[in-house]
Image: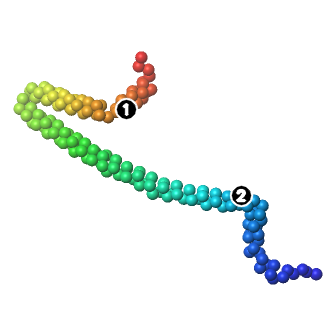
């Protein structure tokens, strides 16, 4: 003997979730409503925060990056590259001029060449000292030199 359920019983199956929801509401109506509000409130706050991070904070950081890189770093690099290249070319031309003029000294040419190289070294040292003084005045290089001293001490041992 088999027992067959009527067809209308299987039609009630979609109502099972609704009955479960009604049961939860009947057990704790205020908790049921608060859980729904909390779910939408938290998801709304998280969605707003996600939008803020994706749009506002990203745009601010992109503007800062654009300003720092394109507005400061690249022009500084280009300026120092041009100045350094011009200075190097000037020193090369001075060396070539000195060497070509010193050939006429005959036997004394090596001594005159050494003096001209010493003169060039003094010029380079003076320019380097001028640039280092400028950098030391306007940039915090004590942290760099302190780090270099710490590395030197670590590699060479105590200097006392």
Q: Is residue 158 left or right of residue 74?
A: right
Q: Is residue 69 left or right of residue 156?
A: left
Q: How far apart in space, not on screen, are marks 2 and 1 (Cα)?
A: 61 Å
Q: Is residue 12 above or below residue 42?
A: below
> What is the crowding at mark 1: few (fewer than 14 residues within 10 Å), some, or many (at least 20)?
few
Residue at image position (42%, 25%) is 153
| Mark 2 or 1, nearer chain start | 2
Q: Which residue is mark 1?
A: 144
Quadrant position of residue 100: top left
Question: What colouring style does the render use?
Answer: rainbow
Quadrant position of residue 160: top left
Q: Which residue is mark 2?
A: 31
Residue at image position (37%, 32%) is 144
Q: Residue furthest front?
A: 30
Residue 101, image x, y percentages: 7, 34
Residue at image position (40%, 30%) is 147
């Amino acid at each position: 003997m088999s027992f067959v359920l009527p067809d209308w019983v299987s039609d009630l199956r979609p109502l099972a979730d609704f009955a479960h929801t009604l049961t939860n509401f009947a057990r704790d109506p205020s908790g049921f409503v608060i859980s729904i509000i909390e779910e939408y409130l938290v998801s709304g706050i998280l969605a707003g925060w996600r939008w803020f991070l994706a749009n506002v904070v990203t745009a601010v950081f992109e503007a800062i990056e654009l300003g720092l890189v394109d507005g400061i770093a690249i022009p500084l690099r280009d300026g120092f590259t041009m100045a350094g290249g011009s200075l190097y070319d000037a020193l090369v031309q001075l060396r070539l001029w000195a060497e070509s003029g010193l050939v006429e000294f005959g036997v004394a040419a090596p001594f005159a060449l050494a003096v001209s190289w010493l003169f060039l070294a003094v010029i380079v040292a003076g320019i380097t000292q001028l640039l280092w003084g400028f950098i030391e005045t306007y940039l915090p290089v004590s942290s760099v030199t302190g780090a270099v001293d710490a590395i030197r001490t670590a590699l060479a041992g105590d200097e006392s």
